[in-house]
Amino acid sequence: MAEKPGVESAISVEYLRSVVEHLEQLGSHPLGFRVAGTPEERAAAHFASSELRALGLEVVDEPVPVDAWRLLDAYVELGGGRRFECASFGGVPETGAEGVSGRLVFVGRGGRRELDRLDVAGAITLVDWCDDGLWPYQVGLELGIRGAAAMVVTSLPGGPYYQAPGALGSFDGLWHREGPPAVTIRKEDAAALVARDGETVRVVLSAPLQRGARASNVVGTLPGRRATRPLLVGAHHDAWFSGAFDDASGVAITLALARACVETGLRPRHPIVFISHTAEEYGIAESAYDWCYGAWRQIAAEHREWSTRAPFYLNVEGSGRPEPFVVDAPPELTGWARRVCRRAALDGLLPHGWRLGSPSTWTEVWPFLAAGVPGINVSTFSSDFNRTEYHTQYDRSAEVDFGYLALLTRVCARLLLAADTDADRFLDFPARARHLRRRLGGASHPGLERALAQLERAEGRRAFTAAARGLHGLDAKETAAYPHEQTARDVENLQAALAAVRLGRHASAARRLARVGLNRLCADLSHEAFAIERSRRGRRAARACWAAQGDPDVGPDLWPELASLRGDPGARSPGPWLEQSVERHLARARRELARRLDRMAAAAGGRTLPLPRADDVRSTPTRARPTERPGAPSNRGGRPTSNER
């Protein structure tokens, strides 16, 4: 009897190309945009669903409630009628058909010290997004409080994004409801606007927001010989602009794998679930955590059982650009992933090389990992692409090497089938214990050390869920970290600041306090804006969604202390109150560190912590204001003072 052809033999370059080219032409705007909950996203979900059904798989379209934001038109118009084409960020409020007119004010990076020198009330503000330390939504919050009518965002030469010639950018908004309408503009066009500072311009943004709209995660299942422990593989079908690379290429790999498995008659040990996710780029308005929403909703609400049963999740991000293949793997899967990739490289499947990375909150693997599912993310993203063409109109199929994409699909097939074979023995718990010991720094906890010794001897799927839920955390910037790391740094910086205060070294104390939690933003936001921003961070914040899994420690509000130490106009003078305040914050941080280390010890020792449930994210966040203290300046009821965020 002839041997059945392997899955790799059925990978088709032509099919991969057809999927990407079909998805990239779905858009609400001439430049694209298939955003969660819009007709374009539903068309993408329907396409994925139809492809899987045509293979004979059992397919379910799982509803995901989202705040659908649909870009229709955006531009800046000069007095003489000349228009500059624009885009915008997901969730940003529209202007209405008439637009918003006002005098143009170039505010540079838009920090409070720049804004204190300008009158932006009623103005159209032009903002240079020039570094990753201050994002447009944070500037928009400050501008909204100060009465700006609208905001035009660019990233001038040297900025963190949109640096390709003529690039027009987009992103998830993370927008505050206090923020004004905002559009993005090419840096070349922005240069022309800078020269017209003070002239009257008009901004038009047509982008209706439909709260509680329906989007869909598509789930197709190939039966396996074991019925209850599914392997998962997925990508996301929503996109900014055409999204050919990010992430139609990932959807193409997912569908091509399903097609190859069916065509070759594969009977895996485990069922294989092929997923096309919605709302990776953006899913809900007015949230600090508005991305990876569809994946979070799936693991937190629709398939909580996967968190304890699914042996493996392969998340496929943008792939096929001629860059190294990057595998983001947790310590438990690093050795296994390395072995698979080394063999693939020897077989000529990775002509541009490969490397291992760490799981990031910018991909959908993180909510699955933090829920307890062993998983990896694969992509060919590069730092150069991120700065130049990422989330711009240049994300087109012409930039995808489909021959390379076919090779990467074969590598993904190997990863998936190796997981099918190795699922009961590929978890390396000693590697996790070693990794955590290296990251403990000076933090000491006898119970955790005993638990790590126990973790080194752990085996099986249950131990992974316990460890993952307790050890996957977030820092104050939503970066993946161990749960104790931000708090431990905060304790160290508060201790150093307290010593500096006692010695009268105010500049040194201010530098240390600015490193605590979110307080780096105090240099750029008024106290009112900082309080609002801080209030929507952390596991208890409204619309925290997947961040509740990582329990980020945003730190105390040190705005008054920093204003005092920096000698801001109107700030309270340093005195005994300052030392007492830092002492109180330090005591609280030490207690919080102990709590976090206790939870980590319990998890490493095998206790399975609860998976946070999907709350009602459609509730509207409340507006926070700074806690007033004697002598602290207040921005309440009018334009802010010169003290800030």
Image (spheres, rainbow, N blue to C red):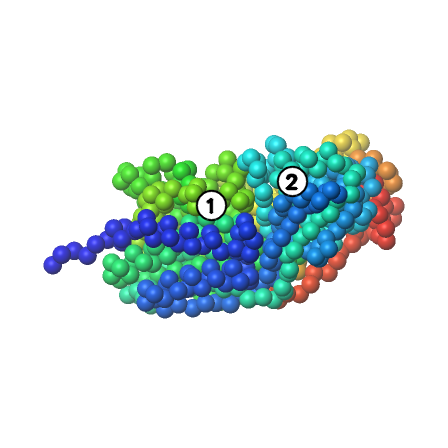
Neighbours of disc 2 within 10 Å: few (<14), some (14-19), many (20+): many
Q: CA distance from mark 2 to mark 1?
A: 21 Å
Amino acid beneath label 2: Thr
**Vertical position of residue 300 compared to residue 626: above or below:** below
Q: Classify residue 514 by image quadrant.
A: top right
Q: Classify residue 485 by image quadrant.
A: top right
Amino acid beneath label 1: Arg
Provide the secondary structure element on which disc 2 rests: strand
Q: Is residue 458 visible?
A: no
Residue at image coords 54%, 59% = 36
Checking the image for residue 396, the label placed there is 1
Residue at image coords 39%, 48% = 333
Q: Earlier in the sequence, mark 2 or mark 1?
A: 2
Q: Quadrant of the C terminus?
A: top right
Q: Position of residue 159 (x, y in %)?
A: 61, 35
Q: Is residue 559 left or right of residue 322?
A: right
Checking the image for residue 64, the label placed there is none
Q: Position of residue 280 (x, y in %)?
A: 52, 54
**Vertical position of residue 51 compared to residue 196: above or below:** below
In the picture of the structure, the residue carrying the numbered disc 2 is 154
